[in-house]
Image (tube, rainbow, N blue to C red):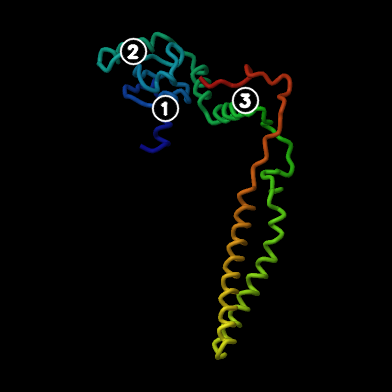
Amino acid sequence: MSDAQLRWLYANCAAVVAASHEDFGLTPLEGNTFGRPAVVLRAGGFLDTMVEGRTGCFIEELTETAVRQAILDLRALGLDRDEITAHAQRFGFEAFKETLVRECELALTARGLDPYPVPGPMPAYDRRAPHDNLKTLRRPLTVAVSALALLTVAAGAVASQQDGPWGQVLLAVAGGLAVATAALGRLRFVLRRRNADSIRPLPPRPFTPPEGRAQDKVFQLR
């Protein structure tokens, strides 16, 4: 069955009968959208989406007699189609959006936060880290590491061509330069990590809710 066929059935039926178990109870609301009442099982999500005596009737048990009696009770009620349609709209998108916005507003206000902050630059993080004085050393360290690496290679190349004590001295110098290069590289890495870890979120700004914004004005979805 297509959506168009389903809409035609809802618009032209006398009532929607749903004798199954549903978690949300969407079926009677679909019929209510077209102003049609519903006869549903007294269980599951139908208890939340159907108002007995105003948008339909409940089936007390899954028997033919109970279903027949619920339909007879519905015919005797003479329900208002406009009221049924208005009930369905309470579960629509606009009502859900308004309720969600108001609930978020109340939650933020309860925590002392402004739900509608003034637009502007957002200071999300405080980058005034306690290691800013060490951060200035990163560039000189990078240059030093690169220079020592080149000196290490040069010293090793010269030592390989020298015999005797000078060769041994140059090899020792090359080894020391290699160790110094590794140490400076490690120091640069540690400073970079400390600077990143020192970034902390800013504390929330204090907010005083304006007068006249009462909680009883919140749209309640029932």
* C-alpha gap between disc 2 and disc 3: 42 Å
| Callout 3: SS | helix
Image location of residue 188, percent across then percent down: 62, 62
Query: Disc 1, disc 3: CB below 8 Å?
Result: no
Task: Please report the residue visible at 48 percent of the width from the left and 25 percent of the height from the top.
Answer: 33
Q: Nearer the viewer, residue 142 or 23?
A: 142
> Which residue is label 1 attached to?
26
Give the total number of marks visible in the rendering. 3
In the depicted structure, whether residue 117 falls above or below residue 44 = below
Any mark on residue 70, and which? 2
> Which residue is label 3 attached to?
106
Image location of residue 210, percent across then percent down: 73, 23
Q: Nearer the viewer, residue 91 or 103?
A: 103
| Callout 2: SS | helix
Amino acid found under the numbered disc labelled 3: Leu
Task: Please report the residue visible at 66 percent of the width from the left and 66 percent of the height from the top.
Answer: 141
> Alpha-carbon neighbours of circle 3 within 10 Å: few (<14), some, or many (≥20)?
some
Any mark on residue 61, and which? none
Q: Quadrant of the N terminus?
A: top left
Q: Earlier in the sequence, mark 2 or mark 3?
A: 2
Q: Earlier in the sequence, mark 1 or mark 2?
A: 1
Q: Nearer the viewer, residue 78 or 218?
A: 218
Task: Please report the residue visible at 69 percent of the width from the left and 56 percent of the height from the top.
Answer: 134
In the depicted structure, whether residue 184 falls above or below residue 8 = below
Image location of residue 123, percent across then percent down: 70, 43
